Image (cartoon, rainbow, N blue to C red):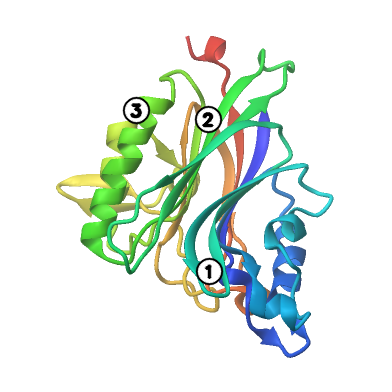
């Protein structure tokens, strides 16, 4: 089955022009990507201050989904006096189950791993089945990311069947590319952008594919956002660039057109 995937750190959808909260432009941009499944980070599903001022929708998750995404799940990670935020997955495919796993490394950064299972329909390419989706937003400190990377590997090994198609997407904050190679090797993954563009870097004597530059959105330099795949083929991948995206968030969205390979075709 052919799917369009997007990952986007929306920076809580806050700020912007007075009287026009940024989340309005975030939704417009998100829908323009026309993704079948969107992995979102820093979704502020409730901010009581903004609601009281009637400056923003009461719940970002439902607002972002609109009438485009019939299925959505939200993992609340950081809780504070005026609301909370976390990761979210929006999907045109039915979601049959989900779980939010706390992978916080210390009290200053609350982080979660949102794991959902979508149902693929039967079509000419295969009999359907489960598609595992993991939305991540890793920590700012290298030690935290190392431990959270190990937690991600452990979760996939214990909860995702070896023959099930898998998409892991999000903001990895891995600007030094220390997690990139180990994740691909340990879980048998490919990364959508680097697979499609064939870029490489020298690391430990091996040549590894290089992810896309996505941060800061105005002039992307750091390679923070990735889409990792297993049992999927990449057709195209790219970053949404331009001034309008820089006004929406500090991250630029990363998108990929993929084909999910049914188990029978992999034998």
**Residue contact between numbered discs 3 and 1, judged by CB atoms under 8 Å:** no
CA distance for labels 1 and 2 = 25 Å
Residue 247 lies, in percent from the top left, at 64, 79
Q: Looking at the image, is mark 2 or mark 3 nearer the viewer?
A: 3
CA distance for labels 3 and 1 = 30 Å
Point out the tag, 3 or 1, that comes first from the N-terminus.
Answer: 3
Name the residue tied to disc 3.
157
Residue 116, quarter of picture: top right
Residue 255 lies, in percent from the top left, at 60, 52
Residue drawn at x 24%, y 50% is 147
Residue drawn at x 39%, y 61% is 110
**Left or right: 211 as drawn, with respect to 177:** right
Residue 156 in sight from this viewpoint: yes
Name the residue tied to disc 2.
232
**Left or right: 93 as drawn, with respect to 42:** right
**Residue contact between numbered discs 2 and 3, judged by CB atoms under 8 Å:** no
Residue 153 lies, in percent from the top left, at 32, 37
Point out the tag, 1 or 2, that comes first from the N-terminus.
Answer: 2
Residue 53 lies, in percent from the top left, at 74, 84
CA distance for labels 2 and 3 = 18 Å
Crowd around label 1: few <14 · some 14–19 · many ≥20 (10 Å): many
Name the residue tied to disc 1.
251
Point out the tag, 2 or 3, that comes first from the N-terminus.
Answer: 3
């Amino acid at each position: 089955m052919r799917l369009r995937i997007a990952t986007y750190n929306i920076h809580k959808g806050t700020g912007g022009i007075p009287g026009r909260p940024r989340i309005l432009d975030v939704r417009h941009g998100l829908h323009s990507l026309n993704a079948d499944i969107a992995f979102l980070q820093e979704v502020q599903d409730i901010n009581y201050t903004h609601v009281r001022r009637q400056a923003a929708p009461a719940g970002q998750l439902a607002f972002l989904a609109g009438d485009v995404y019939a299925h959505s799940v939200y993992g609340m990670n950081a809780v504070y006096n005026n609301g909370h935020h976390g990761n979210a997955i929006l999907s045109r495919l039915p979601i049959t189950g989900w779980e939010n796993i706390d992978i916080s490394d210390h009290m200053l950064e609350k982080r979660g791993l949102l794991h959902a299972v979508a149902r693929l329909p039967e079509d000419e390419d295969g009999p359907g089945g489960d598609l595992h989706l993991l939305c991540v937003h890793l920590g700012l400190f290298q030690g935290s990311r190392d431990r959270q990377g190990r937690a991600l590997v452990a979760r996939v090994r214990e909860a995702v069947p070896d023959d099930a198609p898998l998409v892991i997407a999000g903001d990895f904050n891995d600007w030094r590319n220390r997690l990139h190679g180990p994740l691909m090797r340990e879980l048998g993954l490919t990364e959508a952008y680097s697979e499609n563009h064939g870029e490489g870097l020298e690391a430990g004597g091996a040549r590894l594919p290089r992810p896309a530059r996505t941060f800061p959105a105005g002039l992307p330099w750091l390679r923070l956002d990735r889409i990792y795949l297993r049992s999927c083929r990449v057709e195209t991948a790219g970053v949404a660039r331009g001034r309008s995206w820089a006004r929406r968030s500090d991250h630029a969205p990363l998108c990929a057109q993929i084909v999910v390979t049914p188990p029978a075709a992999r034998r």
